[in-house]
Every structure is written in C-alpha cells, then in structure tokens.
C-alpha cells in the first residue's frame, strides 16, 4: 500500500494521481534577531533568497521533460515571485525577524489564507 500524504489540495474534493516529491523541506537556521541598523541588509538578503528560488525553479522547469513537472515548477516559481509575498517578508524583517524565518512565516500565512479560502482561489 502507498504512503498517505496530507496537505492542502488545489481543488475541492478528492483527487488521485501521481505524486511528485522532490525532497524533504529544509531545516531553518537558528533564529537571529535583526538589529534596527541591519534591517535594510536583511530585507535585501530575503529578496535575494526569493529571487534565487525563482531562478532555480525556472531553470528546473526549463530542464524538465514532463509537462506536469514543468507546470508544477512554473506555478511554484510564480508563487515565490509574488510581490505580496515579498511585502510580507519585508514587513516581518522590519519587526526584527531574520530573512529565513520571515520567508517561512510569510509562506505559512499565505498557506493559511489559501486554506481559509477553501483551498482554491475563492473564485
């Protein structure tokens, strides 16, 4: 019997199909408080990290040979490139949260909003 995987679906109801699991989520580094005089540099660090993820996902999409994989990677790149996400990361960093944890918290907030909308765009 296959492994049961739980999470937020992108459609209502039940769906079956192949699962693409690339790797386990990365571990976050130890929390580091960002001093006020370092906020600008930390915001830049967060923006650069998101840009690097977008570039990597787009590179992987371009190299993928399965249409479903291409679509998944491009969708993930679009989510990581969302200006609202970057705004959330920036706002969190301005409260003293380091870039890695700000990115993690911003994605968690966006996942919660997605789940609250019923796992769809609400449309």
Image (tube, rainbow, N blue to C red):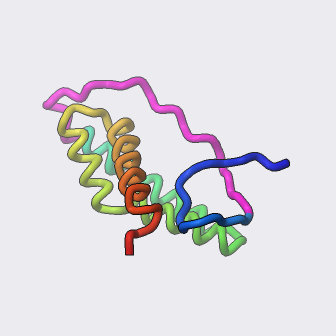
Residue 32 or residue 52, whichever sits in front: 32
Q: Position of residue 105 (x, y in %)?
A: 36, 41
Disc tally is 0
Look at the image and say whether residue 56 sits in the magenta stretch. no
Residue at the far left in the pictured view: 37
Q: Magenta stretch mostly in which secondary structure?
A: loop
Quadrant where the C terminus sits is bottom left
Q: Position of residue 58 (x, y in %)?
A: 52, 65
Q: What stretch is highlighted in magenta?
A: 18-41
Q: Is residue 31 above or below residue 59?
A: above
Question: What residue is at 71 percent from the left and 71 percent from the top?
Answer: 66
Residue at the far right in the pictured view: 1
Q: Is residue 82 left or right of residue 75?
A: left
Q: Where is residue 46 in the image (x, y as percent from the top left)?
A: 33, 45
Q: In this view, does 45 lie to the left or right of 16?
A: left
Look at the image and say whether residue 35 sits in the magenta stretch. yes
Q: Where is residue 87 in the image (x, y as percent from the top left)?
A: 24, 54
Q: In this view, does 2 lie to the left or right of 80?
A: right
| Residue 26 lies in quadrant | top right
Residue 32 or residue 118, whichever sits in front: 118
Question: What residue is at 52 percent from the left and 68 percent from the top?
Answer: 74
Question: What residue is at 18 percent from the left and 27 percent from the top?
Answer: 35
Question: What residue is at 46 percent from the left and 32 percent from the top?
Answer: 28
Q: In this view, does 44 lie above or below 8?
A: above
Q: Is residue 117 left or right of residue 44?
A: right
């Amino acid at each position: 019997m296959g492994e049961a995987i739980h999470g937020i679906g992108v459609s209502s109801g039940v769906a079956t199909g192949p699962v693409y699991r690339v790797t386990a989520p990365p571990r976050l580094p130890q929390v580091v408080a960002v001093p006020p005089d370092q906020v600008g540099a930390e915001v830049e660090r967060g923006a650069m990290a998101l840009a690097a993820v977008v570039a990597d996902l787009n590179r992987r999409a371009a190299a993928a040979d399965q249409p479903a994989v291409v679509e998944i990677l491009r969708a993930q790149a679009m989510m990581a490139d969302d200006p609202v996400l970057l705004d959330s990361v920036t706002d969190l960093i301005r409260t003293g949260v380091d870039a890695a944890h700000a990115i993690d918290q911003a994605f968690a907030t966006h996942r919660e909003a997605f789940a609250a909308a019923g796992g769809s765009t609400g449309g």
